Image (cartoon, helix red, strand yellow):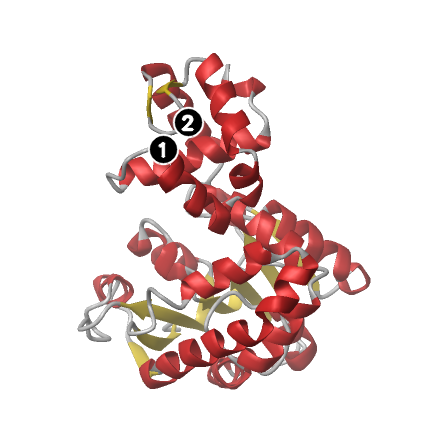
Amino acid sequence: MEDSLCLEEIGLLLLIDRLQANHQTLGRETIVPFAELKQPAVARGYAALIGVLLEKGFVRGDAEAFALTPDGSRAVRDIAQRCSLNALFYDEYYRAIRHSRAHALFCERVYGKDLGQHGMADMQQLDRALAELQIEPGMTLLDFGCGDGQISEYIADASGALVTGVDLAGQAIRIAAERTAGKRDRIKFRCADVEKEPESLGAEMFDRVIAIDSLFFTRDQPSVTKLLLDHLTPGGRMVVFYICPPPVAENETAFARGLSALGQTYRVLDFSVQNKQHWLKKEAALKDLESMFKAEGNEFLYKNRLAECGGIQDFRRFLYVVRMLN
């Protein structure tokens, strides 16, 4: 029966699954605020969508308080195998920023250039990472978690690398491919959740790999780390921007432990001070542009990016530099 669900109904079930996993009460008071940050269409149509799930027997109760039925739990498990809340969110995010002048100004103020950024790396940090990679023209580079590919395109144009961007958000990849249609000889994109589908990278090898604030959010970091290293050529280089809660040290993160378990050495640059400054700058820029976001009808973008500022501003932030042995 889950095959007959529309995208918003699927989104609501995935929101329910996320909140239930965090042991939160299911109902209007928890679902709607969360949906406003992740799936605005679900927030707008909440009452009607819950009505559909009640009719289909996926939940019991009412719009104010409900619980998943056994059929609903089975539907969520099946949907989660084919789709993710993160993928749906980023589809919505990249669709919205495409025509948002407010978001473009926000990125210019916070990052130094509008590349549709959703991470924490400003242009100074990005250029430092590229310097650490020591890219030569014609080298192949994998951008893991590329979003809509604006950073991938910047890297290709700045370095002369042949860039492959991979991301789980289908809408972002479609936007990236459309925008770079005239550069397909040196930039290509692939929609895949490589954690679930490691075979999606095929047998392709890369001289360089970059992961900007993406690897931290994978479920099995050691496995993803090994996968990326397996696709790095001998003598190749990889840089990973990584955040972690204090007081975790740079050699104690899941990523660092994964590297050590594989016998792989690395260097670390600490950007924790810059991380704190980033969040302060981001919050100030958003508040200054609030009315512009709302006038565009992009309150979803404003609320989502403002919510970011309340959770990880005190996290530590590192740039790991890895070089494969020959």
Q: Is label 1 in a helix, a strand or a loop?
A: loop
The answer to which image quadrant residue 299 occupies is: bottom right
| Residue corresponding to mark 2 | 63
Quadrant (top left, top right, bottom left, bottom right) of the C terminus: bottom left
The answer to which image quadrant residue 213 occupies is: bottom left
What residue sits 54% from the left and 84% below the top?
Answer: 127
**Identity of the amino acid at label 2?**
Ala
> Badge 1, how many Cα within 10 Å: few under 14, some, many 20+?
some
| Residue corresponding to mark 1 | 27
| Nearer the observer, 242 or 222 | 242
**326 vs 30: above or below:** below
Q: Do the residues bearing badges 1 and 2 touch, measured as CB atoms within 8 Å?
A: yes
What residue sits 70% from the left and 77% below the top?
Answer: 157
What residue sits 43% from the left and 47% below the top?
Answer: 33
* Left or right side of 201 for 257: left
- What's the CA distance linking mark 1 and mark 2? 6 Å
| Nearer the observer, 85 or 161 | 85
What residue sits 24% from the left and 67% below the top?
Answer: 245
